[in-house]
Image (cartoon, coloured by chain):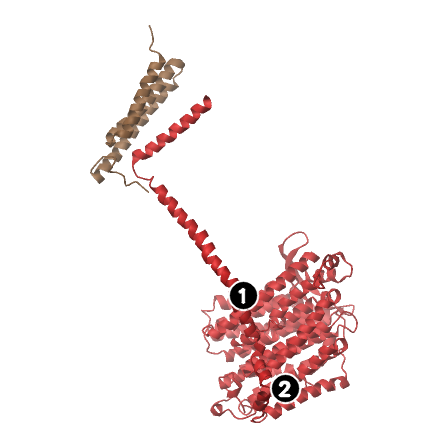
């Protein structure tokens, strides 16, 4: 089978499965629908690997450089000669890499859900939504056109909304779904404005034409942008920052991160797929897609991105240390790790030796998908066993959940950056890129990495060691079937070995092979910091002790504000409820009620009624009265005629 | 032989016409109203014939029109009488003031 055909099948098979499951869902048995979904995604994953093999080893490389390969492209909506929205599929290193990640993790999650979601209501719809999500995410990464990406971007948002709100009888799930949708939608407004600005200046929406036109210094397209500036940033930088705002919304960067922890209300496999491995890295992917423009024409925008990323990384890591809901810990950990990728892109530049951050970021995206999905699926297995999300209901589970325990430990080691696990390589690459380009961010990165190790092992020790949770001791057991264990084992394999892939020779900003620097002396520091974090976690949480409580008491203000997520949600509530609602919402409501509704709508109705009341007296039903009017009319016409002829 | 001048004929038809109009507005009995309408039609007929005779004696259009109108008037009367009979069956009256349900 040709590679082009395979990549088309990759995209449309999940769509087909979505249509099948959602239209004929009522007639298909739940088990069958689950198997259909899993089969489809497994085929997709196999094809993705096949296409990736073909791209990386057979046809992708032209003259030693990976070039883009457009599989198909057609004009979908044409505005004028130059500007059209195209639909198509493009293969280039990052999209091929994303194809593998998405289809692979998605297949694992489909398989896992067979057992995890067994017996749930609307099981078929769950699989339909998962397929829809896979389709939209795959469409997003192969987009040839900024607007195509935007459309799939919104589709992804919709499927995320549907899946977060899957338990729609729970008020908290509905609230979380709405919050996620509104926050990301708000961010997408920035994205849309950014798209419009970019396309206005560059007269195209096509990614590659856009990049070509906006990276040649002194081209007329750039001149159109740099002519004006606002607050010290050129229009181009603003446009790119607005595009990034959309990415920040999806990738949960500060201050738009508030939806992601709440999104954990969805089923755990969904969190693993959407809110850890794939959708939330869409923002990273977006920046990576437009990276040449950022790096060449708007380095100031890239700096801002770097600082946003660095701040978010630290900020989310601190919050993660205090959370007690295991899924929320993982959620904040996700935010922190994505911020890692973002600031890795931010510190990268264009040209020889500077674009290492780009590769590092993509590398971390790749490895993170494995271990974070694994962590979530492991957490799901734990939740499945103890029927609670809270750490206090867990403890000492290593005996009863051996497979979960081992895989979870591997994932924790990977995320903590302990060699030779996957996270070590990608994290070192990021830190080394930061070290070369921006020292403050490097220190933030190292600090965050230590905190990451700490909170991950806090989680690990609290779940699997520590005291035995009393009321659970009797009946928590690994009741999971192969459907839950196999994904854990496969993902654990990925989390252990994914780092050994020579990633730099496949994915880089310019398509040429980049050797990620690997310096033993350099790695010692961050690894020691990570080990320190693990040690502290062991001392505090390895056994049941009073120490953690004492420490949190001694820094109670810091602890409490971190526990309450630094009151960001409250600030948002204050701003929306008190400022926006009171100052804008209430007056508009009053205006609507009294002016629009009162005067315009009811007023026009009342005047119509009054007028008709006045007129209807004329309709007496008396024939002769009508005839009188008729006669009057004739006389007037006659009079006019007479006047005219006189 | 001295002819009757055209004016006299027109005065006759006008008198007939306004008699018809007057009857139409003042009578309460539907039959009388119908008769008034016939008067109006006949005044028009007289006009047609008169104009034909006095102004275009070599043509016949006016006469033809008159014949048409008489035919149509006959049809119209039969229709109107049918309506009036139905009205009577329903309301037991043919007083025009009592049949005023045809409003709004």
Q: Are marks 1 and 2 in contact (CB under 8 Å)?
A: no
Mark linked to residue A96:
none
Q: Which chain is brown?
A: B
Tag 1 secondary structure? helix
Residue B100: x %, y % from top left: 27, 39
* Crowd rating for badge 1 (residues with CA inside 10 Å; few <14, some 14–19, many 20+): few
> Quick check: A567 above or below B102?
below
Q: Which chain is red?
A: A
Front one among A297 and A494: A297
Q: Quadrant of the C terminus of chain B?
A: top left
Residue A639: x %, y % from top left: 41, 26
Q: Quadrant of the N terminus of chain B?
A: top left
Snapshot quadrant of residue A77? bottom right
Residue A88: x %, y % from top left: 64, 62
* Crowd rating for badge 2 (residues with CA inside 10 Å; few <14, some 14–19, many 20+): many
Front one among A349 and A621: A621
Please give left or right for residue A403 compared with residue A28 in the image: right
Tag 2 secondary structure? helix
Labels in figure, total: 2
Mark linked to residue A580:
1
Q: Are marks 1 and 2 on the same chain?
A: yes
The chain letter under disc 2 is A
Front one among A601 and A395: A601
Q: Which residue is mark 2?
A: A454
Front one among A488 and A294: A294
The structure residue drawn at horizontal position 29% and vertical position 30%, both measured from the top left corner, is B25
Please give left or right for residue A502 compared with residue A631 in the image: right
């Amino acid at each position: 089978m040709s590679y082009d055909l395979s990549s088309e099948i990759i995209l449309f098979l999940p769509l087909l499965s979505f249509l099948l499951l959602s239209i004929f869902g009522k007639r298909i048995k739940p088990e069958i629908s689950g198997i259909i979904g899993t089969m489809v995604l497994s085929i997709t994953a196999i094809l993705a690997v096949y296409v990736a093999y073909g791209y990386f080893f057979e046809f992708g490389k032209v003259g030693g450089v990976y070039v883009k390969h457009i599989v198909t492209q057609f004009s979908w909506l044409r505005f004028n000669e130059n500007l059209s929205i195209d639909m198509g599929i493009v293969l280039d290193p990052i999209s091929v890499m994303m194809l593998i990640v998405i289809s692979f993790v998605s297949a694992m999650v489909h398989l896992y859900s067979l057992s995890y979601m067994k017996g749930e209501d609307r099981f078929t719809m769950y699989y339909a939504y998962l397929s829809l999500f896979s389709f939209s995410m795959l469409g997003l990464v192969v987009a040839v056109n900024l607007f195509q990406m935007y459309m799939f971007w919104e589709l992804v948002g919709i499927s995320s909304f549907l899946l977060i709100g899957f338990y729609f009888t729970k008020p908290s799930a509905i609230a979380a779904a709405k919050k996620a949708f509104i926050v990301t939608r708000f961010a997408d407004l920035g994205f849309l404005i950014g798209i419009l600005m970019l396309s206005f200046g560059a007269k195209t929406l096509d990614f590659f034409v856009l990049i070509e036109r906006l990276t040649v210094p002194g081209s007329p397209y750039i001149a159109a942008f740099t002519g004006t500036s606002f607050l010290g940033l050129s229009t181009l930088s603003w446009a790119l920052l607005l595009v990034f705002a959309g990415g920040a919304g999806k990738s949960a960067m500060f201050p738009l991160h508030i939806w992601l922890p709440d999104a954990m209300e969805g089923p755990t496999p969904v969190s693993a797929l959407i809110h850890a491995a794939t959708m939330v890295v869409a923002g990273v992917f977006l920046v990576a897609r437009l990276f040449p423009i950022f790096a060449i024409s708007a380095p100031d925008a890239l700096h801002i991105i770097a600082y946003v990323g660095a701040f978010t990384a630290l900020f989310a890591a601190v919050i993660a240390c205090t959370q007690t809901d295991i899924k929320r810990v993982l959620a904040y950990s996700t935010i922190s790790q994505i911020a890692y990728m973002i600031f890795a892109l931010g510190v990268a530049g264009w040209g020889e030796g500077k674009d290492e951050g780009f590769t590092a970021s993509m590398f971390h995206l790749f490895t993170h998908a494995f271990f974070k999905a694994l962590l979530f699926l492991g957490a799901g297995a734990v939740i499945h066993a103890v029927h609670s999300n809270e750490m206090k209901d867990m403890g000492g589970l290593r005996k009863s959940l051996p497979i979960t325990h081992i895989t979870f430990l591997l994932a924790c080691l990977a995320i903590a950056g302990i060699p030779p696990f996957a996270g070590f390589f990608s994290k070192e690459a990021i830190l080394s890129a930061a070290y070369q380009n921006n020292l403050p961010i490097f220190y933030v990165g190292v600090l965050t990495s230590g905190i990451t190790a700490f909170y991950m092992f806090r989680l690990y020790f609290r779940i699997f060691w520590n005291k035995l949770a009393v009321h659970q001791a009797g009946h928590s057991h690994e009741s999971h079937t192969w459907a839950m264990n196999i994904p854990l084992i496969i993902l654990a394999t990925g989390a252990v070995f994914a780092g050994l892939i020579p990633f730099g020779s496949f994915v880089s900003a310019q398509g040429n092979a980049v050797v990620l620097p690997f310096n033993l002396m350099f790695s010692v520091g961050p690894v020691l910091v990570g080990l320190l974090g693990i040690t502290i976690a062991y001392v505090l949480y390895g056994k049941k002790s009073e120490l953690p409580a004492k420490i949190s008491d001694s820094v109670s203000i810091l602890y409490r504000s971190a526990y309450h997520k630094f009151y960001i949600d409250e600030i948002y509530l204050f701003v929306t409820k008190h400022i926006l609602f009171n100052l804008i919402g209430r007056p508009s409501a009053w205006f609507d009620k009294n002016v629009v509704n009162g005067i315009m709508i009811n007023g026009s109705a009342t005047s119509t009624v009054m007028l008709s009341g006045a007129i209807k007296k004329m309709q007496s039903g008396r024939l002769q009265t009508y005839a009188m009017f008729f006669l009057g009319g004739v006389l007037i016409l006659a009079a006019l005629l007479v006047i005219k002829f006189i | 032989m001295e002819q009757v001048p055209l004016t006299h004929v027109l005065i006759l038809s006008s008198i007939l016409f306004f008699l018809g109009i007057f009857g139409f507005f003042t009578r309460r009995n539907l039959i009388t109203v119908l008769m008034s309408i016939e008067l109006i039609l006949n005044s028009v007929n007289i006009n047609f014939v008169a104009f034909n005779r006095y102004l275009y004696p070599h043509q016949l259009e006016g006469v033809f029109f008159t014949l048409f109108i008489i035919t149509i008037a006959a049809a119209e009367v039969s229709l109107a009488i049918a309506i009036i009979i139905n009205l009577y069956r329903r309301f037991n009256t043919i007083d025009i003031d009592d049949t005023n349900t045809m409003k709004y």
